[in-house]
Image (spheres, rainbow, N blue to C red):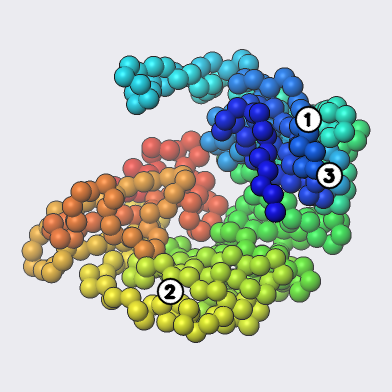
Amino acid sequence: NTLKQIGKGKPASSLMFAKFSPDGNKVAYVSEHNIYVEDLATNTIKSLTTNGTSRMINGTFDWVYEEEFGCLDGFRWSPDGNSIAYWQIDATKIKNFLMINNTDSIYSFNVPVEYPKVGQDPSACKIGVVDVATAQTKWLAVPGSEIQNYIPRMDWIPNTNEVILQQLNREQNQSKLFVANAGTGSITEIYKETNQSWIDAQDQFIWLNGNKEFIYQTEKDGYNHFYRVSKDGKKETLITKGDYDIIDLSLVDEKNNTIYFLASPSNATQKYLYKTKLDGKGKLEMVTPSIFPGTHSYSISPNGLFARHTYQSSTVSPVTEWMNFAAQQPTTMDGSITNQIAKQQPIKNKVEFFKVTTEDGVTLDGWMKKPDNFDATKKYPVVFYVYGEPASQTAADVWGAGRNGLYAGDMAKDGYIYISMDNRGAPVPKGTAWRKAIYKNIGVLNIRDQA
């Protein structure tokens, strides 16, 4: 075996997102805002884009796309390995926000970051498909303004020369899906959704039935659900029926007509694995054993035979077992979750979970940690930890609930009652109306609920 350096001659620490071509003969990567492809047999490096600067960004993203849409890796190999689809971000008109670096030298200095303030135009964005052999780019004819629309998601349709992408308008209350011919750049709108508040970017595109259908995730019926939609967008079927939210997708098993996902219909502080039929004709079934109340996560092999299962709660520190997923059994009894929990020391002062109904009739979940050796006849100072919304949950049945990472001491030992609650707008599985109640109400509803 021979160890080879990829990107030899490029500036140190400049290579990002190195990815093998489908046939494994080439590697593509980004360096200093340009996309390169390297032949592994000859180590020949070819520049696929040449106009990259700190303001003309190829194959990666600016601050807005990174921070708000979670976009980092901005290019995709085609299924046949002959071309690469990529984002180009034009930030040339974005003004700088000056940050201060006080740590890297004796004297502080400014660090300019392109950052559009509220009301200012964001960067322009477009999608190109570059031919690996000729380094020629064909731009997709995405309709609408490149500045007043975002393209947060894009990928190839498997085993085709077509690209699917999601476009959000500036207000993010309208989402359109397009399918583009990578060879001609022509594009067709296949699906449109509007919402009175906002629409999130798709996590991923999963294709079914020989690329005739795909899975689409939306909150349009009042809950976060999966639909299977025909490629032309004319037919859709609700897969996950019921008054519950999908928390996260775990596995699509098309062969066995089953989809697995995390959900928690009856307790928003917890997470469990569920399944239902992929054709939308099945009932909701809980897969996680009910003897383990708390928060579960699964990493399931693509063939659905094996999985890594992690469990934790406010009283159980995280434990992980490898399991025969098809049989729902641990691969070894010694490594089972049951055996690992038995070795843990029991918690003496447990977190108490509670529900409280506000004057608006809204039920909030929360937890409370009482002082050690609590005496109900005494009075204690109370500390509330408030996050609020919209990106995180605090009232979760996880290890560490009841601990204050911002406090140098131990609140329970120091005689404090410690409480945290999730108000409306927190990203918990309580339906769309709950999560989007904060639209144009941030700083209003959270105070009202918490007070």
Residue at the spot 86% in from the left edge and 59% down from the top edge? 210
The three-letter amino acid code for the residue at tag 2 is Pro
The three-letter amino acid code for the residue at tag 1 is Lys
Nearer to the camera, 333 or 450:
333
| Disc 2 versus disc 3: nearer the observer | 3
On the image, numbered disc 1 is attached to which residue? 46
Residue 56 is situated, as x and y percent measured from the top left of the image, at 66, 21
380 sits to left or right of 108: left
| Residue 77 visible to an observer of this rendering | no
Q: Which of the marked residues, 2 or 3, is nearer the chain's N terminus?
A: 3
* Label 1 crowd (10 A; few <14 / some 14-19 / many >=20): some
118 sits to left or right of 57: left
Return the mark for residue 293: 2
Q: Which of the marked residues, 2 or 1, is nearer the chain's N terminus?
A: 1
Whether the residues at callouts 2 and 3 have beta carbons within 8 Å, the answer is: no
| Disc 2 versus disc 1: nearer the observer | 1
